[in-house]
Amino acid sequence: MIIRAAEMGDAAAVAEIWYEGWQDGHLGHVPDALVAIRTEESFGSRAAQRVDDTTVAVRDGEVAGFVMVVGDEVEQVYVSRRHRGSGVAGDLLAAAERLVASGGHARAWLAVATGNARARRFYERCGWVDEGAFDYPAAGEDGPIPVPCQRYVKAV
C-alpha cells in the first residue's frame, strides 16, 4: 500500500468512497437538513475542491481510502467498503497524525457523529480520547448546520 498526497485524478475515487462511507456512518445520526444537501454530486464537487487537504491510500493501483487534514483537525477518514478491515484506516489515521504534528500542533482532534459507534470504537482502539459532546458546524447552503458529535483528541 502507498500513502501519498492526493492528485486531481484521485477526486472521483475519493468522492465515491466519501459518499458511500458518509451514508454508512451518518444516516440516522445527523439532521435531515444535512442529509438533504449531501447528495452524490455534492461529494464529487467537494472532493475536487479538497484535493490539497487530502491524502490517499492506494492499494493494487486503486484508491482504497483517504484522509483530509486541516490544521490540527482530522476532518475526514474514509475507507472503501472493499478495503475495510484491511488496516487501511489505521495507516491513514497514522498519516493524519503525522501531518498534524508536522504542522506544529501537539494535539489532533476530530469530530464523530455521536451515533457512529463503529467509528468511535475504531478511534478509541487507535488511542484517541473522547472529550465529550458538542455540535459540529457542518457547512450548509444557508449557513452551518449543527451536528451532534463527540470530540476526540490525541497527542501527536
Image: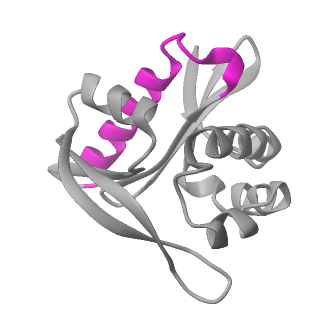
Q: In this view, does 85 lie above or below 74?
A: above
Can you name the residue that lies furthest to the bottom here?
Answer: 142
Residue drawn at point x = 57 percent, y = 66 percent = 31
Image quadrant holding the C terminus, namely top left
The spot of residue 65 in percent (x, y) is: 61, 30
Name the dominant secondary structure of the magenta segment: helix
The spot of residue 141 in percent (x, y) is: 68, 83
Q: Does the magenta stretch include residue 90?
A: yes
Q: Does the magenta stretch include residue 34?
A: no
Rendered image coloring scheme: one colour
Task: Please state the total of marks drawn on the protein image.
Answer: 0
Residue drawn at point x = 82 percent, y = 54 percent = 40
Q: In which quarter of the image is residue 43?
A: bottom right
Residue drawn at point x = 22 percent, y = 36 percent = 128
Horizontal side, residue 64 vs residue 123: left or right = right
The spot of residue 74 in percent (x, y) is: 39, 50
Residues in magenta? 80-103
Horizontal side, residue 86 vs residue 62: left or right = left
Q: In this view, does 11 lie above or below 149?
A: above
Q: Quadrant of residue 155?
A: top left
Residue drawn at point x = 36 percent, y = 44 percent = 99
Image quadrant holding the N terminus, namely top right
Horizontal side, residue 148 vs residue 60: left or right = left
Which residue is at the front of the view, 102 or 37? 37
The spot of residue 151 in percent (x, y) is: 27, 54
